[in-house]
Image (spheres, rainbow, N blue to C red):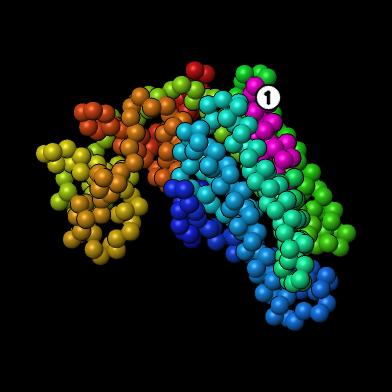
Amino acid sequence: MFRHTVPLGRIFGIVVDLDYSWFLVFGLLTWILAVSYYPAEFTNWSSGEYWLMGAVTAIMLFVSVLLHELGHSVVAKRFGIPVPRITLFIFGGVSEIAAEPPSAGVEFWIAAVGPLVSFALATLFWELEPLVAFSSPLLALTKYLALLNLVLGAFNLLPGFPLDGGRVLRAFVWRVTSNYQRATAVAAVTGRFFGFFLIFMGVWQALAGNFIGGLWIAFIGWFLESAAGSQLQQEALKSLIGEHRVLDAMKQDFLQISGDVTLQELVDKHVLPGGARCFVVSDASGLTGMVTFAGIRGVSRSAWPTTTASQVMVPVQKLVTIRPDARLWSALEKMGRNGVNQLPVVDGNGIVGMLSREDILHYLGVLREFGT
């Protein structure tokens, strides 16, 4: 989902990444707090104190959002759903939950715990205020963080996808109708409504003089509307794919090469004439790796005549593979999670085919044309 991130480490086995866009929020929030909010509330601070408290508050917002997302992730893992990564970005954070919840009840608890964590943090900072009253900077920090977490929890409870409230709504509709697709559609349509509403409110605020605040509200609305619209498209695609399997769309006439073939030979004999974009590398023992089009492009053209396939291939130990009986939708999800465009299809006897995004799109086109 996010291509440009800074790795921060692991918490409970979950990778935590910081998208570059977060630094924009950090800088903007620090600036607003240092030149506007804190000077209006506390007139006796020095300029350095304003900027220091602005930066500390922005970092604590980062911590609050991270704890909010950890709430989702820990509960998901307790229900047996893998969560490989949490990414913090310009609009908050996202937990990359690897599978759909198996029931409406599980969906409810995974969604609800995030706002509950935010409300718990708001209560904690509120209770800390009397204990730090001796220090105006600490008092200002706890007051602002209490308000910030209260707003974070309340906003996320709006009943529209992709907000937590939208997922709670999906859980209720799912429980009542026993139809996950219909529940998702209801939550996504509601999410688009809230998105358009926030865009309207943001533009109105900007025209009324609150340009930065209004622009930010409009951007949040745009993000919500886009995410909800994407979810609707995703569900339509998932419905079309249905229970079709990798075996239905994969290519069995994939090209196998030996590891000593040069990149120049690959390009001249296969890429240019036939448009091949990936090559299976094998030897007498079986599959050893795969050469991708991106791997070839990563080597200078002047080095193609002397660079072999084995030197640029992705080794078999690092290959992302899929079984022929897996669902096509699972293949698309696996491609998205791992940032790859093709998957070797393997069974107990070794590699039996190749599946690319283009293969899936072609297969979907056939399904649409014949209405199957």
Residue 92 showing in the rendered view: yes
Q: Would you place residue 117 above or below residue 248 in this image?
A: below
Of 131 and 99, nearer the camera is 131
Classified by dominant secondary structure, the portion drawn in magenta counts as helix
Start and end of the magenta stretch? 155-175
Viewer-side residue, 7 vs 233? 7
Q: Residue at x 18, y 41 (%)?
A: 282
Q: Is residue 44 left or right of residue 54?
A: right
Q: Which residue appears at 84% of the width and 56% of the height?
A: 205
Magenta stretch encompasses residue 319: no
Disc 1 crowd, CA 10 A, few/some/many (<14, 14-19, 20+): many
Residue with the mark numbered 1: 173
> Where residue 100 sits in the image (x, y, percent)?
52, 32
Task: Identify residue type, mark 1.
Answer: Val
- Say what secondary structure mark 1 lies in: helix
Q: Classify residue 50 as left or right of residue 343.
A: right
Residue 272 at x, y percent in the picture:
30, 48
Percent x, y of residue 200: 81, 48
Residue at 77%, 67% in the rendered image: 133
Q: Is residue 157 magenta?
A: yes
The mark tally for this picture is: 1
Q: Nearer the viewer, residue 63 or 251?
A: 63
Residue 235 position (above or below residue 311): above
Residue pictured at 71% horizontal, 47% vertical: 119
